[in-house]
Amino acid sequence: MPFISKDWRSPGEAWVKTDEGWEKLKVLECGKRTRHPSTSDDEDNETIPPHCHITIRCTREIAGFNGLGEVVRRLDFRSSVRDRRRFHYICALLRLLVAHKGIANLSGSAQKLLLQMVEEVASHVNDSQQHFNVLRGLTTQLQQIVNQENQKCWGKPLGSMNLWQEHVETIKRIESLTSQIEIKEPGPEIRPKLHDLPEECIREIILRIADHKDLEATSSAWTLMAALVSEQRVWRELTRFHFNQNQINTVLDMNKFKLQPGKKDWKKIYHQLRRTYGVNDDYQFAEVLSLCRYCCCLFWPSDGHPCIVDQCPEFKQRLEEAGGQLEVSQPVLPSQFLKFFSL
């Protein structure tokens, strides 16, 4: 007996021609201005926060595929490069994609988008005169990819020759811009300089360094900094920043970290804790992507997202009656973000 109903097939996606090629309309609409019928012209300035629904686990009832290019566009990664809170997160993601996955393992659109983001990083570093070491590391990784023989088949690059040639030209532009960047020291009229600050101010700056490698590198910049970095207080605060009291107590039970009665070698304590427990990488990111457990959306915490709890009063009421929390989200580090995709 035939099944009489609406055609189950989708009418297809709506595509729009842009300067960067054809894009899905639903992706472009994510960042467009939206207007409610009851709002006036003066109130028509709301934008949809960057967010993206993802499929965490495929089941019989829920089947889906997460496209890296679409998710990156919906979360507005390229524009977020110039956001100082998100810069290091996006650069860490780029390093993982370039170093561990390689461009050849991505789709053509994702390849172009990745290189566009690196080019945006180069432009931002050139304009801001900051984070040159981050750009230099990305440029070195890209050059290694161009020279890798394992991405060639019978002497030719995998995939479209024209697309690969575009990638090579983009990488050359990035390298050219990187080689031309010159970090300029502020002129003599700019005051105060670092050397003009009192010792108390410099100590407070050092106390806010969260990476032990950066902390040790500052000691070679100036004799005063070297003296401050050697202070036990600096390493004590760094230890308490990364590890809880139970972890610290475990190491303190070892008498070998005591300099003399009543004093401790906090630098040795920190490195022992680091070797034992490791250091969480999320400290270096001012803002980390979050995953909403209710609507399975990735979003930037500073922007929020249209959650089902806010849009469906009945769901919110049932949640309150069940004693559930209204805000349940978890941070998503760059390595965890890549696990949502089949790369």
Image: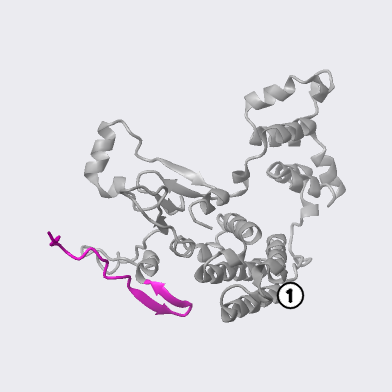
Report crowding for label 1: few under 14, some 14 to 19, many 20 or more residues within 10 A (C-alpha).
Answer: few
Q: Is residue 280 left or right of residue 196?
A: left
Decide which of 6, 22 is in the foreground and name it: 6
Q: Is residue 85 magenta?
A: no
**Secondary structure state at the residue bearing disc 1:** helix
**In percent of the image, x 87 and y 47: which residue is there?**
223
Report the colour scheme. Answer: one colour
- Does 6 appear in magenta? yes
Q: Residue at x 64, y 58 (%)?
A: 95
- Can residue 1 be seen from the camera position used here? yes
> Can you tell which quarter of the image residue 200 is in?
top right
| Amino acid found under the numbered disc labelled 1 | Gln
Residue 34 location (% of width, % of height): 31, 65
Q: Position of residue 99 (x, y in %)?
A: 66, 59
Query: Looking at the image, how many numbered discs can be counted on the residues?
Result: 1
Residue name at image x 57 percent, y 50 percent? 335
Is 199 or 147 nearer to us in this picture?
A: 147
Corner quadrant of residue 167: bottom right
For disc 1, the marked residue is 180
Q: Where are the magenta residues, as a range?
A: 1-24
Query: In which quarter of the view is residue 11 placed?
Result: bottom left
Viewport quadrant of the N terminus: bottom left
